[in-house]
Structure formats: C-alpha cells, structure tokens
Amino acid sequence: MYINSLRMVSFALKLKGRTYNIFNKIKRKLRYRLGTLLYQILLQNNSYSVKFAYFLLCQLKMIRTWDPWIMKKGNEYHAFCLASLITEEPFWMTGIILHLVSKDLEKWSFADVTLQPDDCQWRNGRILAGSCVEENNKFYLFYSASPQKPNILTERIGLAVSNDLRNWQQQLDVLIVLDYKIYANSRRTDSIYEHCQCRDPYVLKCDVTNQYYLIFSTAISDAHDHYRGCVGLAVSQSIDGPYKLLKPLLFPHLHEEINNGIFYELERPQLIIKNGKYYLFFSAWGHTINPNALDYYSELNLDKSALYCYVSDSLDGLYKHVSEFKIVPGSEKTGMYGTNFLQDENGEWFAYGWYLERFTCEISRKFRVNWDADIPRILIPNQD
C-alpha cells in the first residue's frame, strides 16, 4: 500500500510538471503573439495607441533597445535609440529608431517612432545608429541603414531633417557613397555575407575651417581581410552635403605591420573638441581584437568591451594614444557598450550607452566623468 501511494504521488507530480510546462508554453506563445501585434501597432505610429503599445511591450519585456544617442534642446533631453522585437535573431538583423524625452535624465517618456525601414531600396531592411544635431533652427538626423537579405550587411548613411524633432523628411539618396579605392568590404567570422561597413555617422562643425566633418565606422581597403576596421571621414561645406570622402581619420594597426589592423570594427565613434585638442572615441568588443594585438592589451579585462581614445592637435591630423592610456579608464567596468559622452545642464560630463545582457539603454547620469586630466575617466559608483 505504501509503495502504491508513492507511485500515485510520483504520477501526480509528473502530471503537475507536464501541466505546468504546457501552461508555460501556451503563456509564452500568447505573449509572443501579443508582442508581435503590439509591435505592429507601434510601427503604424499614427495614433494615440502607439504610446500604449510601447508601454505594454516594455511591461511584457518584448522589446529590445540599444545604441542610444542624446541631444539637448532647451530644457529637454532627446534620446534616440534602436529597437526591435525580442524574437528577432540575431538582434541586429532589424531595427527602428525610437524617440524619448526627459527633463532630468531620469524620467523618460516615449515620444514616437522616428524612423523605420520603408520602400526605399537601400534602407528597406534595417535601420542602424547615428547622431542628431541642431543647425539653423532645424534638426539633422544622420543615420545608417541597409537593405533586406541577401544585402543585409550592405550599410549606407542617410539623412533626415525636421523642424520640430517629430516630423522627419528623409533624403531619398544615400549621403555617402563609398570609394572602394579608400574603403572596402570585410567579412564577419559569423556570417556568410560580405560586410560593407558604413554606419554610425557623427557630425562636427570645425570653427577653424567652417566645414562639416562626418566620421563613421567603416573598413580600410589596403589591409588585412578581417582586421581592417577604421574611422572614416568625409567633409562638406554644408551640413546636408554633399560630402566628399577623405582618407580614414584613424586606422589602428600593429606597429610592425602597417596593413594589419587591430580591430575588426570601430563602432559609435565620437569626436569632441576640448582644450584646443580633438578627442576621438570609439567602442570595440574584446572578441573583435586581432589576436596578434592581444599582448598589447593583455593587462586589461576586455572580455566584453571598452571605450578607446585617441587625440590630435588638429581635426584631420595624426591621432595618437593619450600618454600611457590605451582605453578610457573605467570604461571596461561599466558593462556598457557604444559609450558616448555628453554634458548636462550644469556642464558636467557623463557617459551613456547600453547593456548587452539586458538590451536596455543607460541614459542617465549614473556614470559621471572626470575630465580634469588629458584623458577622461569614467567614475564607477561605489568605487570612486
């Protein structure tokens, strides 16, 4: 009798476990279906239901966000970031640009979907990161995009213009056409497609030349097949172009092998003028470093990512490491990627970016920056 009772208990537990698993599968399917429906409502972007759809997607944890960039307008901060449905794999195979607004860098409200793939052939696959600047009472959103498969990795840079940060007019033509005598394709180790890197545009006006300089993530032509990541450069007399391609602003390479690069890709570049010097920053994953260069970074914990800094006395001059520093101190400890710097309303610098593990954006003042020395230092809470 005792044995029969044990068998009955065991059977009941198994039945409970199977019921629990079935219930979870049904729950997961319903969640995914609801998430897909809400995401479609979000993409319509033409009704009051859009904000509610975004709220529910966040509550259901059905939306990913990454690669933020922030601009300040009056007493408001405007953050733009990439987003996609959580079921998309890999995450970078698609993307739209969301717009959020805050007055204190703590409480953010969803504004709208700024850009998404459309019928234009060179941007009907995915939207990638960029930057936004104000000029002549207009806002210029520089972004990157690519077509659908099989050209999903053929990236191009575009421009959208707005009078109010809400309604955007996109240029039909790409802003920059790569010159393959200067720049070239590369190949990701995890992809069968050739990768035409041309993304992450960032624009800066030079007060000396009165010209607009556009930097972007790309690959140099005359280099190692895989490790040829560089920061591209283009210049224009007008912010909306046309832009003329120049030689790369920076190509980090092994000292003994000028054609053997250190990185596969230099992402989210940013150029900041401070104390009469030009500081060039970019992010890179540890696994994208050339194995032949790992000894150079052996003392650093670069399993995930870090922010790199080069400095020059002139915008298009020779960029070098700042003294003995190879990365921005503290950047390897934040857990963020695609790190950029911004000054708040008090003139204080802070670092922001996104977390790969959670696919969430860090767009607060959590990581303040001490920039009293030649190189900025990211302060880690409870450690500095």
Image: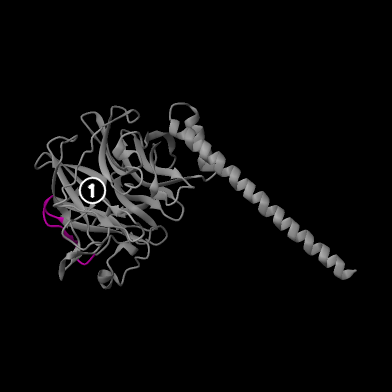
Which of these two is toward me, 236 or 275? 236
- 175 vs 38, left or right, is left
Using the rendered image of the protein, determine whether residue 254 is visible from the camera's viewpoint. yes
| Quadrant in the picture for residue 46 | top left
Other-residue count near label 1 (Cα within 10 Å), few / some / many at <14 / 14–19 / ≥20: many
Which of these two is toward me, 111 or 82? 82
Locate the C terminus and report the quarter of the image it occupies. Answer: bottom left
Locate the N terminus and report the quarter of the image it occupies. Answer: bottom right
Q: Residues in magenta?
A: 312-325
Q: Residue at x 26, y 43 (%)?
A: 156
Please provide percent x and percent y for residue 247: 13, 51
Please provide percent x and percent y for residue 188: 31, 58
* Extreme residue toward the right, this view: 1
| Quadrant in the picture for residue 328 | bottom left
Indicate the secondary structure of the residue bearing disc 1: strand
- Residue 218 counted in the magenta span: no
